[in-house]
Amino acid sequence: MHLDQDIRGDVAVLTVSRAVTTGPDVAPLHEGIKGLVRDGIRKVVVDFSQAPWFGSAMLGVLIASLMTLRGVGGEIRLVGITDRMGSVLTVTGLDRVFQKVDTVDRAVASFKG
């Protein structure tokens, strides 16, 4: 997994590139979010539009990341969720936990509303 970071005001946009399937592949995401929290960032958008797939390990990291953020009053938004990814979120019930947004700009704006 490759992870790019873009800070937009008080919102961090993390763009995931490449398929993410195993535990070692996903660890950088949660570590990155913990680093953002240490730096005072509480609002995070995770953009999967450049990742064709993620596996169950990513689900665990997304939940851990959400708990980290909510523990400090923060929140996370997901962008670029394909139908295949969305079906995994639906089957696991996580579609009711994570807010999916259609574009990065809308996800960033959703934190202001």
Image (cartoon, rainbow, N blue to C red):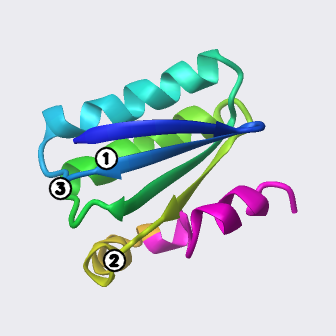
Q: Residue at x 14, y 51 (%)?
A: 21
For label 1, the residue is 60
Q: Residue 35: give x, y in percent of width and height.
A: 52, 19
Spatial CA distance of label 3 from label 2 is 12 Å
Q: Pointer 2: what residue?
A: 82
> Is disc 1 placed on a helix, strand or loop?
helix
Helix, strand or loop at label 2? It is: loop
Magenta stretch contains residue 106: yes
**Label 2 CA crowd tier, 10 Å (few <14, some 14–19, many 20+):** some
In the image shown, does 105 or 37 lie closer to the viewer? 105
The answer to whether residue 56 is left or right of residue 99 is left
Q: Which residues are magenta?
A: 95-113
Q: Secondary structure at mark 3?
A: loop
**Location of residue 89 in the rendering, given as x and y in whole percent from the top left corner:** 36, 71
**Numbered marks: total:** 3
Place of residue 30 in the rendered image (x, y in percent of width and height, measured from the top left): 40, 32
Label 3 sits on residue: 19
Residue type at mark 1: give it: Gly
Q: Amino acid at mark 2?
A: Thr
Mark-to-mark CA distance, 1 and 2: 18 Å
Q: Position of residue 112 (x, y in %)?
A: 85, 56
Q: Residues within 10 Å of mark 1 (few under 14, many from 20)?
A: some
Look at the picture and state if 104 lies above or below 46. Answer: below
Report the residue at 43% width, 67% height from top: 94
Residue 107 found in image quarter: bottom right
Asked whether the residues under the numbered discs 3 and 2 touch, taking CB atoms below 8 Å apart as contact, a structural biologist would say: no
In primary-sequence order, the first of circles 3 and 1 is 3
